[in-house]
């Protein structure tokens, strides 16, 4: 299954950068089906559609009342439950963007949500999320059947 990873996050808002940081790390590992969309995933809609993925995993900071650094893979049926809690640092609501992806490419769309601790402007990522970053990358590598070693 062709899977595209789309990392989302604002590098100026502490833990909100986590999706973008994970995408950057996967790109360093040699993955070519990864996009670092930072805080404007809607700007990459056409690029995603051109790649014609069968599955998209969007990685972003969320608040689902978990422990800082905890992550969960949410299916479409669960988007509505967390969409109100997703941090709105994006110009287009993520639930709408995800629906556009699903309709535009006919693919499965998932949200890998990561529970944040702090979103202060111009702050560093919290230690909880820095520690979770490796676990999330290992989870993705395992999910997609890749090894942790660089290509």
Image: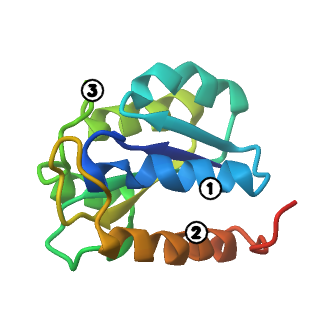
Q: Are marks 2 and 1 in contact (CB under 8 Å)?
A: yes
Toward the viewer: 135 or 4? 135
Give the mark, 2 or 1, whose residue is nearer the N terminus: 1
Foreground disc of the pair 2, 3:
2
Distance between the alpha carbons at the discs numbered 1 and 3: 25 Å
Q: Quadrant of the N terminus?
A: bottom right
Counting from the top left corner in percent of width and height, residue 40 is at 38, 27
Counting from the top left corner in percent of width and height, residue 20 is at 47, 46
Asked if residue 1 shows in the view, the reply is: no
Residue under label 1, please give it.
25
Counting from the top left corner in percent of width and height, residue 44 is at 52, 25
Give the mark, 2 or 3, whose residue is nearer the N terminus: 3
Looking at the image, how many numbered discs can be counted on the residues?
3
- Secondary structure of the residue carrying numbered label 2: helix
Determine the residue positioned at 87% across, 60% down: 151
Counting from the top left corner in percent of width and height, residue 83 is at 19, 49
Q: Is residue 34 left or right of residue 82?
A: right
Distance between the alpha carbons at the discs numbered 2 and 3: 26 Å
Residue under label 2, please give it.
137
- Secondary structure of the residue carrying numbered label 3: loop
Crowd tier of the residue under label 3, counting other residues whose Cα lies within 10 Å: few below 14, some 14–19, many 20 or above: some
Residue under label 3, please give it.
92
Q: Is residue 147 left or right of residue 85?
A: right
- Secondary structure of the residue carrying numbered label 1: helix
Toward the viewer: 15 or 90? 15
Numbered badge on residue 128: none
Asked if residue 29 shows in the view, the reply is: yes
């Amino acid at each position: 299954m062709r899977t595209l990873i789309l990392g989302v996050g604002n590098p100026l808002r502490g833990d909100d950068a986590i999706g973008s940081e994970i995408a950057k790390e996967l790109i360093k590992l040699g993955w070519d089906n990864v996009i670092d969309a930072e805080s404007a995933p809607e700007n990459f809609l056409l690029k995603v559609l051109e790649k014609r993925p069968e599955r998209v995993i969007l990685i972003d900071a969320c608040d689902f009342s978990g422990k800082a650094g905890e992550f969960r893979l949410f299916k479409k049926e669960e988007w509505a439950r967390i969409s109100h809690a997703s941090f709105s640092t994006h110009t287009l609501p993520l639930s709408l963007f995800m629906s556009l992806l699903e309709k535009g490419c006919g693919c499965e769309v998932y949200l890998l949500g990561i529970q944040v601790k702090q979103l202060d402007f111009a702050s560093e990522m919290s230690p909880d999320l820095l520690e979770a970053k490796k676990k999330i990358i290992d989870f993705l590598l395992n999910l997609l059947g890749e090894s942790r070693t660089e290509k």
